[in-house]
Amino acid sequence: MRLKSFFWAISSLLILLLLSETVHIFGVVNIIATLLILTLSYIVLTQLFGTIKKTEDSITISPLKWPKYLYISISLLVALYLYTTLSGKIVSQWERNLGLVLILALILIPTLIILARTTTIMDDFVIIDEEFITINDGDIIQKIAIKDIAYVTNHKFIEIALQSSGHININKKSLNLNFIDNLRLFKIIQKLTPDKTTLKSN
């Protein structure tokens, strides 16, 4: 117990020292502005912009790329601004290196990961027509007969229980669908089976 308390005390001290150094290097205003811009743009652009295409016979839900590219652009501009700020400051070599590591680890690497996912594995989709739900998850294509659905739940996966046997999980993360798209998909499946769908969503 003492060892655990000691570990947490040391960890807290190191975090406080890192925060203090970060404030000294970039300034309070720049840090607050960076957090607000990146947090709000991430939530709005990557989670709340969805796409749904309706025709007479089907509904298609697929990841929308342009909001993610816009978020990537904003993140890169923020990183460039922080780098310019760091370059114009009189700081020690240690502080300059720490600033570069923070920009790289907290902004550039996460942004490049989003860019890689957006450009390479964003061709997933779900098509719902009168008879089937077709799921294209990368190289895997599944078809679910709507009349075979017993009920659907929404937790870590969208789980569709089948009347015939077993169930099928729709992996929301691997489909690259954001929060609003996942919610729409679940609601649509529920509406298609109103007499036998149980709504269980967390």
Image (cartoon, rainbow, N blue to C red):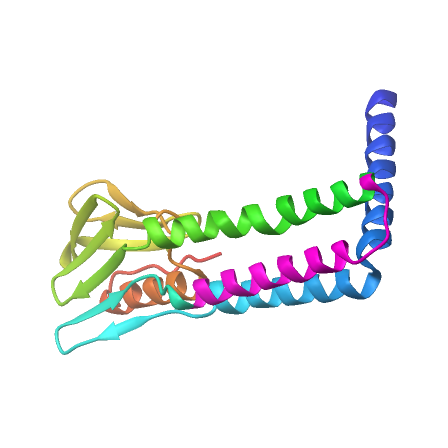
Q: Residue at x 40, y 67 (%)?
A: 66
Residue 39's spot in the image, x, y percent? 62, 62
Relative vertical location of residue 130 with respect to residue 172 in this rendering, above or below:
below
Please indicate, yes or no, whether residue 10 appears anywhere in the rendered image.
yes
Dividing the picture into quarters, in which one does residue 146 lie? bottom left
Give the mark count: 0
Residue 27 pos. (x, y %): 83, 60
Q: Which residues are magenta?
A: 67-93
Along the viewing direction, whichever of 33 and 169 lies nearer the viewer: 33
Judged by its main secondary structure, the magenta piece is helix
Residue 89 is a magenta residue: yes
Image: 122 above or below 191: above
Q: Position of residue 16 (x, y in %)?
A: 86, 44
Nearer the observer, 15 or 57: 15
Mark yes or no: residue 175 visible: no
**In-image side of 160 versus 72 (left or right):** left
Query: In the image shown, does 163 or 185 lie closer to the viewer?
Result: 185
Membership of 7 in magenta stretch? no
Is 125 drawn above or below residue 137 in the view shown?
A: below
Q: Position of residue 50 (x, y in %)?
A: 39, 69
For the N terminus, the image quarter is: top right
Is residue 136 shown left or right of residue 35? left
Give me the residue at 45% from left, 61% from top. Answer: 179
Residue located at (34% from left, 59% from top) = 198
Q: Nearer the viewer, residue 149 or 103?
A: 103
